[in-house]
Amino acid sequence: MSPEGIPGIERLIEEAGKGQELQYGTNQDRLRIDLRVDDIELWQAHRASHPDNANLLLACESGSGELLDTRLTWVVGAAIRPAWVGGSAQAMDLLRTLGVSAQLVELASLHCPGLGESIIWAFHLERHGWLTATPVQSWT
């Protein structure tokens, strides 16, 4: 499904315009929503090749062991881990457990429509600490 066809994402794409990204928060606690078609397609390709029952894709330090024993990290060299959560509150709890600050988790809950519910989101941390969220697809 193209990003334009994901309910709730159309508004973000329109708001982002040609920049294809949105940023929320302060310099230190910043959420970046990546709406670049190429990046969305990369996450979609990963999802297609790993058809786990998941509504989150997470770039983690470790691909083995329990998900809760690793931390969110940047994409290069990361282990992409799928997760299923039952709603926004569980998504927020999981992100906090993976080392994301409370401020960034709050920004994600406010600006990622369908988080933990109707939209699959991919998350990674930037090297400078920003949280990046990319809508992957709708699963409803």
Image (cartoon, rainbow, N blue to C red):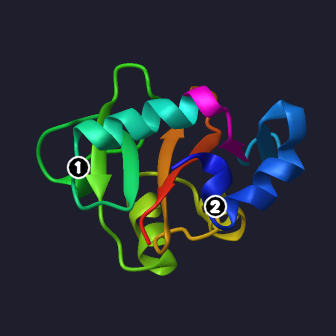
Label 1 or label 2, whichever lies nearer to me, is 1
Task: Name the one closer to the observer, 139 or 33.
Answer: 139
Task: Name the one closer to the observer, 62 or 81.
Answer: 81
- For residue 97, which quarter of the picture? bottom left
Rendered position, 95 above or below 62: below
Q: Assign the C terminus to one quadrant of the image.
A: bottom left
- Mark 1 is on which residue type? Pro
The residue at which mark 1 appears reads as 51
The residue at which mark 2 appears reads as 108
Please state the extent of the stretch shown in magenta in the rendering.
31-38
Label 2: few (<14), some (14–19) or many (≥20) C-alpha neighbours in 10 Å: many
Of marks 1 and 2, which one's residue comes earlier in the chain? 1
- Mark 2 is on which residue type? Ala
Task: Name the one closer to the observer, 68 or 63.
Answer: 63
Tell me which residue sits at (79%, 45%) in the image: 22
Residue 90 percent across, percent down from the top left: 41, 76
Q: 44 left or right of 33?
A: left
Task: Name the one closer to the observer, 69 or 51.
Answer: 51
Tell me which residue sits at (81%, 40%) in the image: 27
Is residue 66 rendered magenta in the image?
Answer: no
